[in-house]
Image (cartoon, rainbow, N blue to C red):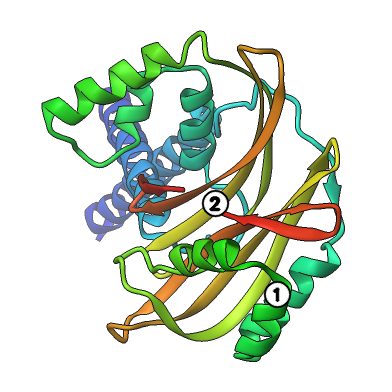
């Protein structure tokens, strides 16, 4: 009887030590993790969503080619078409969501970033990021 | 008894460390819980790119053939005098499934003294940069 109790106590003790070691390993791992690499360069200030790019996002979301055509010239439209390719290389044919993620500006040039979720021509879910280049209130480029 | 205790704690620690590392790697590679926010791999890629660390850039890319690696090295060497990075701004990003898109704005001073601001959109898959635009 006493031997059984001693064995149980010993098992609980060993298990406690093991759990303590396990938790210590987790803590050590987190302490040694240096995190993401620091950005050695300064960052530009973020700005509000520019109106021309907001209009473009609205036109894409509402599937309005007429509005889209009025917002940019044919070269920029071609760039936009090229930008709306899924990571698998298929064009995005069903746009479900267009989300503004941030913009910054320098010397009269504003870059506005967007993320599009939808389905590509192969029927696969796709996520695409693109950036609009805005100068003097006009969309002059798409990346 | 003490030797056993030290052994059990040590085994637990090593296991805890390795399991945590495995969990962090899997969560990061699969894009779980990463619907928004800057991904460490994307930041590391951008910094390596701007600092012309071609080996670090290659490490964050999917495995490439030797000719592509040589071309990347050449491009990095040729761009050494071409432009000096002035700023690196994270605009934002999002994840869907295993894919993640991270967008940056980069400001450089070209060799002729002009300053340029241009965007770079990274597509990440499994912690590797599979596309830049």
Residue A83 vertical position relative to residue B13 in the rendered view, above or below: below
Q: Residue at x 41, y 74 (%)?
A: A126
Labels 1 and 2 within one chain: no
Q: Specify the label residue B87 is tagged with.
A: none
Disc count in the image? 2
Crowding near the residue tagged with mark 1, few <14, some 14–19, many ≥20 C-alpha atoms within 10 Å: many
* In this view, the mark in front (1 or 2): 1
Q: Badge 1 sits on which subunit?
A: A
The residue depicted at 80 percent of the width and 68 percent of the height is: A52
Residue A87, quarter of the rendered image: bottom left
Q: Is residue B71 left or right of residue A33?
A: left
Pointer 1: what residue?
Answer: A56
Cα–Cα span, label 1 and label 2: 20 Å
Q: Secondary structure at mark 2?
A: strand
From this viewpoint, is residue A28 visible?
Answer: no
- Residue B21 image position (x, y, % from top left): 37, 41
Residue at horizontal 51 percent and vertical 61 percent from the top: A79
**Horizontal and vertical percent position of residue A138:** 79, 60
Quadrant showing the N terminus of chain A: bottom left
Q: Chain of mark 2?
A: B
Q: Is residue A16 left or right of residue B10?
A: right
Secondary structure of the residue carrying numbered label 1 = helix
Label 2 sits on residue = B102
Q: Is residue A27 visible?
A: yes
Q: Residues within 10 Å of mark 2 (few under 14, many from 20)?
A: many
Residue located at (45% from left, 42% from top) = A20
Task: Tell me residue A99's x, y (percent).
Answer: 66, 72
Quarter of the view holding residue A59: bottom right
Q: Where residue B30 sits in the image (x, y, percent)?
A: 36, 59
Residue B104 quadrant: top right
Name of the residue lying farthest toward the left:
B66
């Amino acid at each position: 009887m006493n031997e059984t109790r001693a064995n149980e106590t010993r098992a609980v003790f060993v298990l406690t030590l093991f759990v303590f070691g396990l938790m210590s390993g987790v803590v050590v791992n987190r302490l040694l993790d240096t995190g993401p690499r620091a950005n050695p360069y300064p960052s530009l200030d973020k700005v509000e969503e520019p109106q021309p790019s907001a209009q473009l996002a609205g036109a894409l979301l509402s599937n309005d080619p007429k509005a889209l055509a009025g917002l940019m010239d044919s070269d920029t439209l071609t760039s936009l078409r090229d930008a709306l390719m899924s990571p698998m290389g298929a064009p995005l044919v069903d746009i479900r969501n267009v989300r503004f993620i941030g913009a910054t500006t320098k010397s009269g040039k504003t870059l506005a970033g967007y993320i599009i979720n939808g389905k590509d021509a192969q029927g696969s879910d796709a996520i695409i990021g693109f950036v609009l280049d805005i100068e003097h209130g006009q969309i002059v480029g798409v990346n | 008894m003490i030797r056993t205790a030290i052994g059990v704690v040590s085994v637990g620690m090593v296991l805890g460390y390795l399991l945590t590392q495995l969990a962090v790697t899997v969560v990061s590679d699969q894009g779980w819980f990463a619907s928004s926010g800057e991904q460490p791999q994307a930041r590391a890629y951008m910094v390596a790119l701007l600092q012309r660390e071609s080996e670090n850039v290659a490490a964050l890319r999917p495995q490439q053939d030797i000719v592509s690696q040589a071309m990347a090295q050449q491009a990095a060497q040729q761009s050494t005098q071409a432009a000096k990075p002035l700023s690196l701004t994270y605009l934002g990003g999002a994840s869907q499934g295993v894919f993640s898109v991270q967008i940056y704005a980069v400001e450089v001073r070209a060799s002729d003294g002009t300053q340029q601001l241009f965007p770079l959109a990274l597509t990440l898959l499994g912690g590797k940069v599979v596309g830049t635009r």
